[in-house]
Amino acid sequence: MLQHFSEKLPVSRWQRDLSDSTVLRNLGVAVGHSMLALEESVKGLSKLGLEKDRIDDDLENNWEVLAEAVQTVMRRHGVKWAYEELGKLMRGGATREDLCKFIKDLKISPEAKRQLLEMTPANYTGRAAEAAAKWSAGATSMRRG
């Protein structure tokens, strides 16, 4: 309904069409349906549960999550064929031991190795915090403006 209104009202105003009053009388119906849909969505979402053990297992069994971080560090240190070399390891899955051995054999600084070896799929978030802060700052400034 709202889509129809957004298409109908501007055109009818330009053409001095008086049928827009009929459309405007139904605006409450469309808003009411939207409110009901949102309330029902919130109700449905509140029934969802978090299976922390399952999430932890998924992370522990998917060390490929760290491929982005490892590849980024390899490129920063000038390792040639970073994507290809890491791809060979990750295809078909890699265990923690596989990834640790790969990192230890890299020709990168000891500090970079230490940082990579401290990462786990559960504690690696990439630049998510930075992106969220940037988004939040943008959303806040939009509300003020």
Image (tube, rainbow, N blue to C red):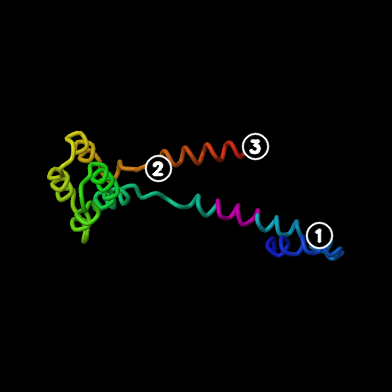
State if disc 1 and disc 3 touch (CB < 8 Å): no
- Which residue is found at the position 46% from the left and 41% from the top? 132
- Which residue is found at the position 13% from the left and 47% from the top? 101
Query: Depth check: 111 or 43 in front?
Result: 111
Query: Depth check: 97 or 89 in front?
Result: 89
- Residue 20's image quarter? bottom right
**Reading the chain from its start, which is encountered first: label 3 or label 1?**
1
- Which residue is found at the position 57% from the left and 37% from the top? 140
The crowd level at tag 3 (other Cα within 10 Å; few <14, some 14-19, many 20+) is few
* SS type, badge 3: loop
In this picture, residue 35 sits left or right of residue 50: right
Q: Amino acid at mark 3?
A: Gly
State if disc 3 and disc 2 touch (CB < 8 Å): no
Range shown magenta:
35-42
The crowd level at tag 1 (other Cα within 10 Å; few <14, some 14-19, many 20+) is few
Query: Depth check: 86 or 90 in front?
Result: 86
Q: In this rendering, which labeled residue sits more in front, label 1 or label 2?
A: 2
- The residue pinned by badge 2 equals 128
x, y (%) of residue 108?
Answer: 18, 40
In this picture, residue 33 sits left or right of residue 44: right
Q: Is residue 8 magenta?
A: no
Q: Give the main secondary structure, helix, strand or loop, of the magenta stretch.
A: helix
Q: In the picture shown, does residue 53 fall above or below 30?
A: above
Image quadrant in which the C terminus is located: top right
- Residue 26's image quarter? bottom right
Separation of residues labelled 1 and 2 (CA atoms): 45 Å
The crowd level at tag 2 (other Cα within 10 Å; few <14, some 14-19, many 20+) is few
- The residue pinned by badge 3 equals 145
- The residue pinned by badge 1 equals 25
Image quadrant in which the N terminus is located: bottom right
* SS type, badge 2: helix
**Reading the chain from its start, which is encountered first: label 1 or label 2?**
1
